[in-house]
Image (cartoon, helix red, strand yellow):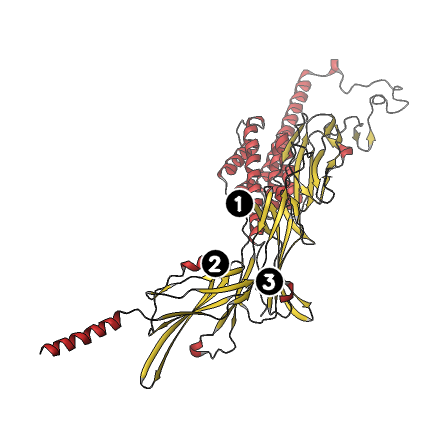
């Protein structure tokens, strides 16, 4: 009995030991020597296992990037003996060159053995005949701070059907990074082999001096394995990678001879142009002139161009508009534009000197300070335009002149003057009757004239102003002109002209030819403040209110400010909409 118990205990201990013992784990590499930019596959096999196991891959992070993982399970029977295992295939990308150690990894309670690989530097001779390779190019080895550095990445490939392509994102501290346009795709012959090329271009603007470290660029994608049998519709894929070495660029400080109080502008060229919308030869008090200054910089973004602030001119009211800032791409370079507009309303007679512009900038090609300038302008302002009062009055086709009004013919004085009624012989009642009839006729005439004026006023109020009262047809480019006329009317405080100018601007702003009155304008804007001011203007024009233009001066100024803010917000929304469409990237490969 004792022997039987001992035997059972031995069997139980053996079975327990077999179940609690960790599963055998092995690790192998597909190769131990690779070239920089290639990947290596680490296979970890766990014997007697069909389900998932615990493993710690954190020791790999110091020297490798795990770019893909795959698992496969197998089971077989040999001489009635069952064998099962699971393989974990890890695709590793080495982060540096030389001898690299793959440390032991804890898998299913056991540690794998240590493995070593050697990563050779990549040479130019390895490019020929490769299915996939990359190159990175910079246009300069040394630049000035905030100068444009062009950085180009090109991926060469002969492999079709690359899926899930991923490039390293450019991230550099204290550097403005802008992608130039959209990626280009074309074909190129390299050593007699036709490659497809995928090209991305960047403009880098370092914001501090010193060394600029551009990191290595890595590409990773997937291609379908040709041995795939589409079992359960799961395609067998393999990971492909390539990389291009980064650069170290020396960034110099701005030169000491550059003006200390000027904005630092390193560029290959900067130009300034000035335009006026009016002729200087016929400017009168109250006229509005629009001055447009256009900046263009080759090698700088439009946002880097500074605003120009002009000194206040005593006899001119200045109304600046929000600047238009943009960028374009010409020959692989960024070209920045800034358009600045100011409306000038002259208020006094005389000659006005409008100051010019002097903008210093640094020529990166010749490495010298240059100046973009606009000369001063002189405007001669005349009196307000009025109708001439010196012309003689015309009546019935003849001209009456003070010198000959008393004589209509040479014989005018030949006959004695004959009175119509002889005073001493006319009875008194006739004189009284004649005076009464004259007064009655005069009263009737005055009454008739007043009635006609009242009827005309009512017709003017009831009838909407038609399109012929506005000089310009509905067009996008006419909105600026209409707004300037509105600003001029505000400065003159003339309510009828202000009403017409405000309606004309609303028609252009909303592109609505059926907008004919202030009520419709206020409703379209949806602004309660604009509506309240429009009501006050109409009351002053047509109501019985005692308000006049002087009492509405503050309201008119506020109306101009609110409408200016409305236009500014609209332009900002348009700019944001354009920026959202700036960097839409097409598919890497065409279908």
Q: CA distance from mark 2 to mark 3?
A: 18 Å
Disc 2 or disc 1, which is closer to the eye? 2
Q: Say which of 49 and 496 sits in front.
A: 49
Q: Is residue 205 left or right of residue 22?
A: right
Work out whether mark 1 precedes mark 3 in sequence or the reverse, and give the earlier one: 3
In this view, the residue farthest toward the top is 424
Residue at 66% from the left image edge and 47% from the top image edge: 142
Q: How many marks?
A: 3
CB under 8 Å between discs 2 and 1: no
The residue beneath circle 2 is 63
Q: Is the residue 172 above or below the residue 386 in the image?
A: below
Disc 1 or disc 3, which is closer to the eye? 3
Q: CA distance from mark 2 to mark 1?
A: 64 Å
Indicate the secondary structure of the residue bearing disc 1: helix
Q: Quadrant of the N terminus?
A: bottom left
Work out whether mark 2 precedes mark 1 in sequence or the reverse, and give the earlier one: 2
Indicate the secondary structure of the residue bearing disc 3: loop
Q: Is residue 312 left or right of residue 221?
A: right
Q: Position of residue 550 (x, y in %)?
A: 58, 26
CB under 8 Å between discs 2 and 3: no
Q: Quadrant of the C terminus?
A: bottom right
Q: Position of residue 447 (x, y in %)?
A: 61, 30
From this viewpoint, is residue 108 visible?
Answer: yes
The residue beneath circle 3 is 122
Q: Say which of 383 and 118 sits in front.
A: 118
Residue 491 picture quarter: top right
Q: Position of residue 307 (x, y in %)?
A: 63, 37
Q: CA distance from mark 1 to mark 3?
A: 66 Å
Q: Is the residue 337 above or below the residue 316 in the image?
A: below
The residue beneath circle 1 is 524
In this view, the residue farthest toward the right is 410
Residue at 54% from the left image edge and 55% from the top image edge: 169
């Amino acid at each position: 009995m004792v022997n039987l118990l001992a035997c059972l205990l031995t069997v139980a201990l053996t079975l327990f030991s077999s179940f609690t013992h960790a599963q055998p784990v092995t690790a192998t590499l597909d190769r131990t020597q690779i070239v920089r930019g290639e990947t290596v596959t680490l296979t970890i096999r766990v014997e007697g296992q069909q389900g998932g196991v615990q493993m710690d891959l954190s020791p790999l992070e110091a020297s490798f990037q795990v770019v893909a993982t795959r698992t496969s399970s197998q089971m077989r029977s040999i001489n009635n003996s069952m064998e099962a295992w699971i393989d974990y295939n890890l695709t590793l990308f080495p982060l540096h060159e030389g001898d690299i150690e793959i440390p032991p990894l804890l898998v299913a309670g056991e540690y794998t053995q240590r493995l070593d690989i050697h990563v050779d530097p990549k040479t130019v001779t390895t490019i020929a005949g490769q299915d996939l390779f990359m190159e990175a190019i910079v246009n300069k080895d040394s630049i000035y701070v905030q100068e444009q550095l062009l950085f180009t990445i090109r991926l060469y490939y002969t492999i079709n059907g690359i899926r899930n392509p991923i490039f390293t994102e450019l991230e550099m501290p204290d550097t403005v990074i802008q992608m130039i346009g959209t990626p280009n795709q074309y074909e190129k012959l390299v050593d007699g082999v036709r490659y497809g090329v995928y090209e991305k271009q960047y403009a880098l603007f370092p914001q501090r001096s010193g060394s600029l470290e551009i990191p290595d660029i890595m590409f990773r994608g997937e291609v379908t394995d040709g041995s795939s049998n589409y079992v359960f519709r799961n395609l067998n894929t393999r990971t492909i990678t390539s990389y291009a070495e980064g650069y170290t660029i020396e960034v110099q400080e701005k030169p000491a001879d550059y003006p200390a109080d000027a904005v630092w502008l390193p560029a290959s060229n900067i130009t300034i142009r000035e335009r006026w919308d009016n002729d200087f030869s016929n400017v009168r008090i109250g006229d509005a002139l629009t001055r447009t200054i256009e900046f263009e910089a080759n090698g700088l973004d439009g946002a880097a161009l500074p605003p120009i602030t002009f000194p206040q001119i005593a006899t001119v009211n200045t109304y600046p508009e929000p600047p238009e800032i943009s960028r374009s791409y010409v020959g692989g370079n960024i070209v920045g534009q800034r358009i600045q507009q100011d409306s000038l309303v002259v208020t006094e007679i005389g000659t006005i000197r409008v100051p010019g512009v002097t903008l210093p900038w640094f020529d990166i090609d010749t490495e010298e300070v240059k100046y973009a300038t606009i000369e001063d302008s002189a405007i001669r302002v005349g009196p307000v335009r009025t109708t001439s009062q010196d012309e003689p009055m015309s009546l019935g086709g003849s001209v009456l002149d003070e010198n000959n009004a008393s004589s209509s013919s040479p014989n005018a004085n030949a006959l004695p003057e004959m009175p119509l009624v002889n005073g001493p012989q006319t009875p008194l009642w006739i004189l009284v009757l004649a005076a009464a009839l004259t007064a009655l006729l005069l009263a009737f005439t005055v009454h008739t004239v007043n009635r006609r004026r009242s009827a005309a006023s009512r017709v003017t109020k009831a009838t909407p102003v038609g399109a012929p009262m506005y000089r310009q047809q509905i067009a996008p480019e006419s909105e600026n002109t209409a707004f300037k006329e509105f600003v001029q009317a505000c400065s003159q405080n003339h309510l009828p002209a202000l009403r017409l100018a405000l309606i004309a601007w609303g028609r252009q702003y909303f592109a609505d030819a059926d907008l004919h009155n202030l009520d419709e304008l206020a409703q379209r804007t949806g602004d309660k403040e604009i509506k309240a001011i429009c009501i006050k203007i109409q009351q002053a024009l047509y109501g019985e209110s005692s308000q006049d233009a002087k009492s509405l001066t503050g309201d008119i100024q506020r109306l101009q400010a609110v409408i200016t803010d409305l236009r500014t917000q609209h332009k900002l929304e348009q700019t944001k909409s354009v920026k959202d469409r700036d960097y839409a990237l097409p598919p890497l490969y065409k279908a």
